[in-house]
Amino acid sequence: MAKRKSIKGLGREIYFQKAEEDKQVKQFTGKQTKRQFPLERATFYIRPEQQDQLEKLKIKLRSRLREQRRGKKRQVDKSELIRLAIDLLNEQDEDLLIKRLTDKS
C-alpha cells in the first residue's frame, strides 16, 4: 500500500487542493472528458437560410456517417460543423478570403 502524502507545511492549502482539482475537471462536459480539450462558448449571427443549410447538412452527414459505420451513431452537431468550417477557413489563402469578403460588400 502506498504511503499517504505528507501534509506538513501545507497550512490551509490542504483544504483547497481538492476544490481546485474538482474545478479543473468541471471545465469539461461529458463528451469533452474523452477528448480532453476545453471548448469556449461564442455567439455568431447568421442568416436564416444559413441556419437551414446548416441543419440540413447536419442531418445529411449524420445519415452518411451512420451508413459508413454500419449503424453505429456518430454524433455530428452544428457546433462541430462550425469548428470544422473555422479550421477550413484557416487553411485558405488570405488573398482569396479578402477577395470573397470584398465581393460580398
Image (tube, grey):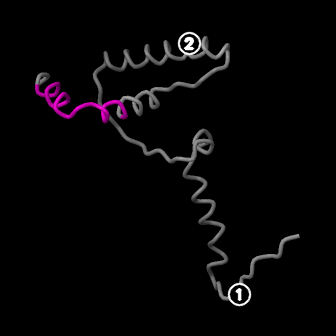
Task: Answer left or right for 72 relative to 101.
Answer: right
Q: Can you say which quadrant of the picture contains the C terminus? A: top left
Q: Residue at x 52, y 47 (%)?
A: 37
Nearer-N-terminus badge (2/1): 1
Q: Residue at x 23, y 32 (%)?
A: 93
Residue 86 sits in which quadrant?
Answer: top left
Q: Amino acid at mark 1?
A: Lys
Q: Which mark is residue 63?
A: 2
Spatial CA distance of label 2 from label 1 is 58 Å
Whether the magenta-drawn stretch holds residue 30 is answered as no
User: Is 13 drawn above or below residue 51 in the view shown?
Assistant: below
| Residue 68 percent coordinates (x, y) | 60, 14
Q: Amino acid at mark 2?
A: Ser
| Residue 22 percent coordinates (x, y) | 63, 60
Task: Answer left or right for 53 relative to 71.
Answer: left
Helix, strand or loop under label 2: helix
- Looking at this view, name the residue that lies furthest to the right: 1
Q: Residue at x 37, y 15 (%)?
A: 53
User: Is 27 drawn above or below residue 84 in the view shown?
Assistant: below
Q: Which mark is residue 21?
A: none
Task: Answer left or right for 40 relative to 4.
Answer: left
Density class for disc 2 (Cα within 10 Å; few <14, some 14-19, many ≥20) is: some
Residue that badge 1 annotates: 8
Q: Are marks 2 and 1 in contact (CB under 8 Å)?
A: no
Q: Residue at x 62, y 66 (%)?
A: 19
Residue 44 sits in which quadrant?
Answer: top left
State the extent of the magenta-drawn residues as a range. 87-102
Density class for disc 1 (Cα within 10 Å; few <14, some 14-19, many ≥20) is: few
Task: Answer left or right for 24 relative to 85.
Answer: right
User: Is 28 drawn above or below residue 10 in the view shown?
Assistant: above
